[in-house]
Amino acid sequence: MPTQENSHMHYEKVEQAIHYLMEHHLQQPSLKEIGDAVGMSEFHLQRVFTQWAGVSPKQFLQYLTKEHAKHALRTSSVFDSALASGLSGSSRLHDLLITHESVTPGEYRSWGKGIHIWYGVHACQFGHCLIAVTQRGVCKLAFFDTDDELKILLTELHSEWKHAEISEDITATQNTADLIFSQSQHTGSLHLLLKGTPFRVQVWQALLNIPEGSLASYQQVAQSIGKPSSARAVASAIANNQIGYLIPCHRVIRGTGALSEYRWGKIRKAALIGWEKSQTEK
């Protein structure tokens, strides 16, 4: 079983391959053409990509086509069933249970006064990420690729929680990173601490009901919270999600089947969607 660090090293090449596939999918490039584009032999690319995703590059591309996405949006029975059953948290890989609470109105107004936050940087199968935790749960998870992007994320963290006590402590966040990104079979639970307006929190809660490997449109999410005319506001709330991956905003796409933008990169969104789909079909 690959380690998180090895998975991160693989992701850098896989990311290049995904980008090439998305740019050239109409030409249906051969494995050799993809390998040449990312500087790898056919054999090495096939091995690394399959080890990372569990499927071949061409199989992975099928999950990212508009045709596949539009079919997934039409097949909304799984999403509807999750909502109807009142699920709080999707049926995640490795039986990881996600629960959540919101900060109190007083904590919201005081920008986190009295809350201690510990943060750390970790490697995972989707690159590097910043994880911030409190005694009440995860309050931030964000991906980055460069040191400058990390600086921006740390500035965001201090801005979002202006009066909280914030300190770096990778030991405090390591167990959380292991629970989230471990590729070994395990059970566990994670608690999230949400900070946002009531509407945004409502949207983020709805995202937790989108099953792993499934997709929903902004309109479907708006309908799920009983506000079918608020698709634009839903899109804004999703764009302001501070806990990536765990609150799966990457599972929301345009009704046309287009992946749309993602605050941590369109290619990373494609990687998340394709990787989850490949894992659920194993």
Image (cartoon, rainbow, N blue to C red):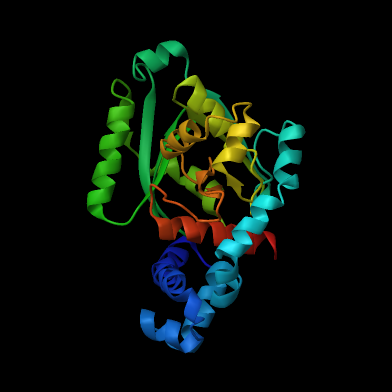
Residue in the foreground of this view, choosing between 183 and 158: 158
Measured from the top left, where is residue 40 in percent x and y?
A: 40, 84
Measured from the top left, where is residue 180 in percent x and y?
A: 54, 48
Is 84 drawn above or below residue 40 in the view shown? above
Q: Residue at x 70, y 63 (%)?
A: 281
Is 44 drawn above or below residue 179 in the view shown? below
| Image quadrant occupied by the N terminus | bottom right
Query: Visible in this render: residue 175?
Result: no
Q: Is 55 displayed left or right of 112 in the figure?
A: right
Q: Residue at x 39, y 71 (%)?
A: 16
Q: Is 156 displayed left or right of 27 in the figure?
A: left
Residue in the foreground of this view, choosing between 116 and 44: 44
Is 55 drawn above or below residue 43 in the view shown? above
Q: Residue at x 32, y 34 (%)?
A: 157
Q: Residue at x 43, y 66 (%)?
A: 11
> Exactly how many numbered labels are in the figure?
0
Measured from the top left, where is residue 65 in percent x and y?
A: 56, 65
| Image quadrant occupied by the C terminus | bottom right
Query: Visible in this render: residue 216?
Result: yes
Q: Is 1 displayed left or right of 126 in the figure?
A: right
Is 104 drawn above or below residue 224 in the view shown? above
Measured from the top left, where is residue 42 in percent x and y?
A: 48, 88
